[in-house]
Amino acid sequence: MTFDRTHNPEPTTQSRPEILAPAGSEDSFLAAIAAGADAIYCGLKHFSARMEAENFSISQLAGLTELAHTRGIKVYVALNTLVKEDDLDSAGRLLDRLNQYVHPDALIISDLSLVNLARQVDYRGEIHLSTLGDLSLKSGLALAKNLGISRVVLPRELNIDEIKALASDSPIDLEIFVHGALCYAVSGRCYWSSFLGGKSGLRGRCVQPCRRLYTYKGIRQRFFSCLDLSLDVLTKPLLSIPRIKSWKIEGRKKGPHYVYYTVRAYQILRDHKDAQMKKMALELLDQALGRNRTHYYFLPQRPYNPIAPKNQSGSGKFIGKVQGPAEKPFFTPREELIPGDLLRVGFEDEKGHHLVKIRKRIPKRGKFHLSKKVTKNTPIFLIDRQEPELTSKIKALKEKLGSLETEKQGIKVLSSNFKPHIPQPKKSKSKHATASLDLNIFRQPVRTTSKAPLGYWLSLDFKKGVQFKAITNKWFVLPPVIWPGEEKAWQKLIEHLVKKRARNFILNAIWQMGLFPKNKKLNLWAGPFCNTSNSLTILTLKQVGFAGAIVSPELERDSFLALPEHSPLPLGIVLKGLWPLCISRTFSDDLKTREPFTSPKQETAWAITYDKNYYLFPNWEINLSEYKNILSQAGYSLFIYIHEPIPPKIKLKKRAGLWNWKHKLL
């Protein structure tokens, strides 16, 4: 593929969104510059949603950002991670140094505490809400703008009609993913990795459990592993939507080859109508070394299930299989291999897989001997490539980067003495004057003689005609995910309940506040799916009208106990009940809901649908009941007990149920 073709965009009166490139290493950053990306997003070595990427130091990113700015390319820094109370000081110092030395054009955040901290360090750039922030409601866009957010990154699960609905009269700019890996779960609604020893996906340490082999009725497959998203030629309708300001390419763990090819492909798809140019763009994407691609749900009339259980779980281009005996394995590549090519032998989630670096040219159908014992027929994939043309471009940019750094030799990146202002400790536990309350939450109405308040999950499928007695004493819980097409129905349901004098609601996304009528005396609490984990986020919740907050159940003991001291709102906690591994909009055609499947370590789980979303549950409950007194003394006043219906084929496992209580949440 030729790298030096001149890119001359055709004149257009349509909206021209930026091409936003990923960068997880210096070479990938420089590849994005070489490709002519309009903007680059990257992360630091802390507080990034892709902690497995190489990422950048402040000093390294300062030089790269200056180089990008000399080319008119913007730089966005992703700090899209869950922030715990004891992270606030270090997050503030990092933001202060970032603001002083890097001067990024935007910050990408998911935890609202970072909006507050950005103001405190006098950051003047834009703030973008990550897709981990889970904003999928039109009524929530105005709230995001009022909080100081400049742009919202939309969920990858949306179809074109839903995108248009959100963009219509939107008070804020929008960004959409056009290419790259798909998570099985809705972003911001996955705790699967955290269940495996505290490696939180919300803190950038996902171990990708959805890519693994699971067993269902004796069959082992990757029932949750998704293909890569690629809107490719379907991006044309997006050009007519003025509020879509950015086409985002996922891939901060990818190499420079992937970055260069995908950026060039989407430039062509954006700027050219010619069929031959579109064909060239598709060829570039074929050579980008990603996974097999899917349009996913983008076309509502032709939705495509992205799960391909029989596919390999990793990225890369298949180039052959291992031949010969295990002691002397070899393979013959389907295409020429050049020095610098990186191969993966085997599947990433299976024993014995390893990487091989090519040192010299191997012709198509030539023979290459492997140094390790490998089973015959093991597949081999090309996962990265270093073409001479791209390598030359990166080398030239490194020389320019070096000259910029030489000019600024006298400037050193110093440590920060910044101390964030956080809510002051409560003088007494009576500050909130909220009595301790045990709240049992059910899916369907239950008969009880107790006068204690009960809670119910709301659903659009909720039985019609159900009449509640003493409705003002009931609590109604909104689901963690509401899609744009459901928004009006939810507004009508909430309006109906409020007219019936319902007053207590638990919202599971801050943006659901827009569903409620204003100037009503309602008791609105931020639910556990809001992922609340620090006092500055709680302060924001108070400012937008919440009366209390139920903290993230993912936290560990010390984080739970530290929160009440500085909280400006009453706090609740999930004390006992089933908590989902994740919530998804898709499900494998080879599985059935309400039936068990098992992990490689023989852990049992199952799926169930609520409002067209799929909830995956483990076969054990959270249970912090033995620590209720400690939590009460720390300042918690609302204790949640979740009662999920258990399918007949599922048997809950007896275990402590402490989740991360005794572990440090990574």
Image: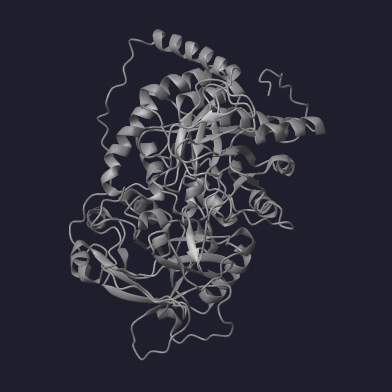
Front residue (pair 167, 328): 328
> Residue at point 34% right, 61% down?
553
- Please state which of residues 298 and 348 is positioned toward the viewer in this rendering: 348
Q: Kindly give the residue lying farthest to the right in the view shown.
A: 275
Residue 259's quadrant in the figure?
A: top right
Percent x, y of residue 569 = 31, 59
Q: Please indicate, yes or no, whether residue 77 appears anywhere in the rendered image.
A: no
**Is 14 located above or below residue 661 in the figure?**
above
Q: Which picture quadrant has residue 310?
A: bottom right
Q: Quadrant of residue 470?
A: bottom left
- Residue occupying the point 54% across, 63% down: 515
Q: Is residue 561 above or below residue 87?
A: below
Residue farthest to the bottom, as pictured: 449
- Give the camera-side residue of 99 and 194: 194
> Is 183 rendered above or below residue 392?
below
Measured as percent of width and height from the top left, residue 142 is found at: 55, 50
Q: Quadrant of the N terminus?
A: top right
Color theme of the render: one colour
Taking the image as drawn, is residue 237 in sight?
yes
At which x and y percent is residue 91? 32, 38
Q: Nearer the viewer, residue 455 or 569?
A: 455
- Percent coordinates x, y for residue 444 in the rendering: 48, 81
What is the count of numbered marks? 0
